[in-house]
Amino acid sequence: MSTARILVVDDDPQARDLLQRLLGTLGAVTQAPDPKRALERLAEGPFDLVMTDMAMPEPGDGLKVLHAVKTQSPDTPVIVVTAFGNIEGALDSIQQGAFDYLAKPFDVDAILRVAKRALEQKRLVEENRSLRQQVERTSLVLVGRSPALLEVYKHVARAAASNVPVLITGETGTGKEMVARALHKRSPRASGPFIPVDCGAITESLMESELFGHAKGSFTGASGARRGVFEEASGGTLFLDEIGDVGMKVQSQLLRVLQEGEIRRVGESVPVKVDVRVVAATNKDLKARVAEGLFREDLLYRLDVVHLHLPPLRERREDVPALVEHFAARHARGGVRPVVTPEAMTRLTGYDWPGNVRQLENVVARALALNVTGVLGPQDFPEPIGDATQKLTGLAGDMPSLAELSRRYAAHVLQHVGGNKSEAARLLDVDRKTLYKLLESPEGGAES
């Protein structure tokens, strides 16, 4: 760990020497007798902490040093000290960016306590920036700057380099697969495959074959041998989404894979070695399912080596504007970045988003699919997000049924994605079968 660089600015040589002895236990201390000399020291390179006297002879004072530090290195904490412990001076320095304010005569314990806290803040700011940049250098984007998401950035960057299983928890739509992909892209396995499996969408009877493969004739319909996803993901990452939906038999087999690093195809007795990192995700309380006898406790321990929790969007509303801008740019038509009005952004930020990030993206994509102006206002978003009196763009003037509105909206989305039914179903957050039903006219005839 590098030694902290600390600058002490004071016109009193005895005060400077005292501060150097005290702060020397925390890092390398440089002295400056006045603001002019302080600016020269700052020009020579950045410091991790600056402690400056407030009242010094002309030219300038402690506020001049504070302004110079905040201009050159905004993240560097500045502690202001003075013999005049008046509240006005404290407010001035704090409001202009000082980390803290201390009064003379010096309280040795207070100086060390505040200096340690300032250096720790500087370290955390730099660490968060570094970890965030590491994650954002991937081809994936984790959008947001809330403290909760910064914790996710940190754990993704730290866990990516290892090979241990990771369990990602969070409500539906919070972005668990996005985090799993970020883990993969930052890992030494990045050049290998990333294979996602939605365990909740596969029946129990087919799950074993899907995961481990099968031999020819091992069951009715097995007309040929087939590799499972564990073999397909060899050398890469296997993402098991909604792991809480897996039945007890397959849970036992998963436990064996995690313990032994080998699988057995259905209908075969010879084990096959696999080299796979497992990342699992769930929106269920697995500890509660263990208590109910629905999930193996030993498997939970094997999966939950590193735990990442994604909080719901309603608990990190400060991320909503960045997400809206990101999704608006992603779904913009003709390469023209749309504009979201302040009133619309306020309403979007204030909504609880029960479907989380996925719902937010769908709402933004819908608004852009129906809006031809490029400016999204409250009227472009459905109740209860937007105006209660809104009319869907292009649908004003008639009073269609709810089924007809659903059909028209599904058709708009399908047109927006160039007829790609899989993408339209994803944007609408439905499966393809439901999409086909939405596209059917209320009168019973399918859309031509």
Image (spheres, helix red, strand yellow):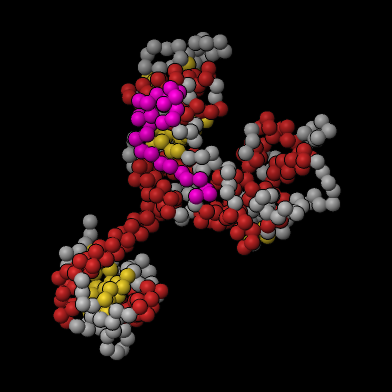
**Foreground: 402 or 422?**
402
Asked if the magenta segment contains residue 370, the reply would be no
Where residue 11 sits in the image (x, y, percent)?
Answer: 22, 84
* Relative horizontal placement of residue 357, taking residue 25 as reference (left or right): right
**Foreground: 297 or 39?**
297
Figure label count: 0
Q: Height in image: 267 above or below 147?
A: above
- Residue bounds of the magenta highlight: 287-315
Task: For residue 326, say whether it is visible.
Answer: no
Q: Quadrant of residue 109?
A: bottom left
Asked if the magenta segment contains residue 294, the reply would be yes
Q: Height in image: 276 above or below 377?
A: above
Q: Height in image: 185 above or below 214?
A: below
Q: Residue at x 84, y 52 (%)?
A: 397
Q: Residue at x 33, y 24 (%)?
A: 259
* Relative horizontal placement of residue 428, taking residue 108 as reference (left or right): right
Where residue 174 sits in the image (x, y, percent)?
Answer: 51, 43
Give the quarter of the figure containing the C terminus: top right
**Foreground: 51 or 215?**
51
Where residue 23 sits in the image (x, y, percent)?
Answer: 19, 68
